[in-house]
Image: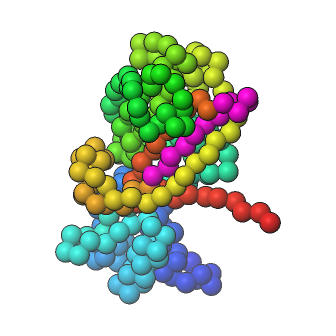
Amino acid sequence: MLKRNGIPLYLQVKEKIFKDIKDNYKVHDIIPAEAKLEEKYKVSRITIRKAIEELEKDNIVIKKQGKGTFVKEEKILYDANSFGSLTQRLSKQKHLLTTKSISFEIIEGEHFVKEFLPCEKLLCIKRTRLLDEVPFALMTNYFDVNTVPDIDKKLNLESLYSFLKEEYNIEFSNAEEVVEALPASASESDKLSIKEGSPLLSLKRIAFDDNGDSIEYSHLVIKGDMYKHKIILTN
């Protein structure tokens, strides 16, 4: 039963639907139609519609004309004020990040990354990442091949940074990161299961050790509708 406690009925219904979604539904699931919710919560159709509108504003659900109301993908908060791998950050938010595919490539000769990571041979690691089993990000990491010998035979952890510390005693001190919005290419859209031209967030990073030497160059591409960037500004 809904309580007459001064809180508008539509907000009470909103909270009950939200709890039901968290307990019983997954991303992309369709929730019951307005008539079913009206019957379940014993309130008017107008109250149900206002509750759904509030859930839309909070990015919990999305209404699709002629199809129904669906559970929306939750945006992931990426705190840009602290250093760490994507896996380390997301595990703190109780999300599971897994690897769908991985490839290794040796790059010799001129390459744009050598401007940031001067060496004779680059090792390029490419991974397609899933967040809670949904395609989420494309990760590309570059290293001096001599810094991480035989990593293609050893890498068996989801967190690359944790592995680098344990296996090669590589620990990063700070980094420079450039963030920009980009449309998904045909290749990116195929790997992330989105339409070509969909918004992506691109993060390009140079990571340094305690001596100020550049150790890694990385490029992370994330689906724009699953991600938000947090930056703290001080005066």
Q: Is residue 116 left or right of residue 102?
A: right
Q: Is residue 50 above or below residue 164?
A: below
Does 128 appear above or below 37? above
Residue at (23% x, 75% y) in the render: 65
Q: Nearer the viewer, residue 15 or 162?
A: 162
Q: Nearer the viewer, residue 84 or 90?
A: 84
Please say if 100 is above or below 222.
above
The structure residue drawn at horizontal position 58% and vertical position 48%, both measured from the top left corner, is 177
- Identify which residue is drawn at 64% across, 18% down: 169
In the rendered structure, which segment of residues is drawn in magenta? 202-213
Q: Which residue of the protein is positioned furthest toward the front in this rendering?
A: 110
Position of residue 70 in the picture relative to residue 224 (left or right):
left
Q: In terms of image quadrants, where is residue 128?
A: top left
Instruction: Provide residue 23's location: percent of width, then percent of height.
Output: 45, 53
Where, quadrant-wise, is the C terminus in this rendering?
bottom right
Residue 140 showing in the rendered view: yes
Q: Position of residue 159 (x, y in %)?
A: 52, 30
Which of 190 and 143 lies nearest the eye of the viewer? Answer: 143
